[in-house]
Amino acid sequence: MDFILITVITFAAVFAFVEIGRALQTYLKFRGKRIVSCPETHRAAAVQVAAGKAAWEAIVGSDELRLSACSRWPEKQDCGQECLRQIEDAPEACLVWTIINHWYQGQECVYCHKPFTEIHWHDHPPALRDKSGKTFQWNAVPAESLQEIFATHSPVCWNCHIAETFRQQHPEMVVDRHDDSRRMNLYH
């Protein structure tokens, strides 16, 4: 009797471990904000998958994805969510972080000319500069507008963004030197 009980408990524990692993994998695969092409307008839309619900449904055997947010809601909240097909086909490619990483890779800061390498989002994220010279972090832009912004703005590293922000907010405290190489050294 003890052998049967131990076998059943072991089987149940292995089954639970596998199902929790599947749920966690599903959650990690579908979490995060994404940019898709809206099937109705053929324009960029920022969406989020209901990742928690998808994880739960992975346990019970359903694989139906649903959105939890869309930049076109609440007006179009009752749409058929056909854009989910894009996410199912390429879940990593439409992630906002992936799109931003690809844009920054191979570019250099417009101020110090330091090339962008791997971006660490939790520590000193990069920024953007508009045509007027104002810098701001990319997360200040609605995700659905990122592609348009990338076409008209320049990449800025964290250090230069902080220095330029200080320069704009406190011009009376900044001494400008017209030697660009010296200015670059002041930022880093």
Image: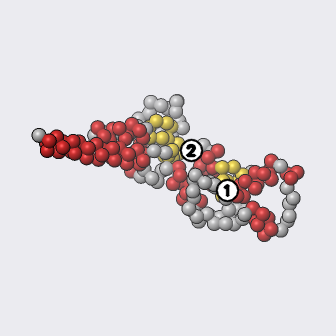
Q: 18 or 150: nearer the eye? A: 18
Question: For the residue marked with disc 1, what is the amino acid?
Answer: Trp
Taking 113 as reference, is 167 left or right? Answer: right
The residue positioned farthest toward the left in the image shown: 1
Spatial separation of the CA atoms under disc 2 and disc 1: 23 Å
Q: Is residue 133 at least partly visible in the picture?
A: no
The residue positioned farthest toward the front in the image shown: 2
- Residue name at image x 70 percent, y 62 percent: 110
Secondary structure under badge 1?
Answer: helix
Secondary structure under badge 2?
Answer: helix
**Residue 3, percent across and down?**
14, 44
- Residue name at image x 87 percent, y 59 percent: 175
- Residue name at image x 80 percent, y 53 percent: 167
Q: Quadrant of residue 155?
A: bottom right
Instruction: Return the disc, 2 or 1, that comes first in the chain's sequence.
Output: 2
**Residue 66, percent across and down?**
40, 37
- Residue name at image x 14 percent, y 41 percent: 2
**Residue 171, percent across and down?**
85, 51
**Residue 172, percent across and down?**
88, 51
* Residue, disc 2: 144
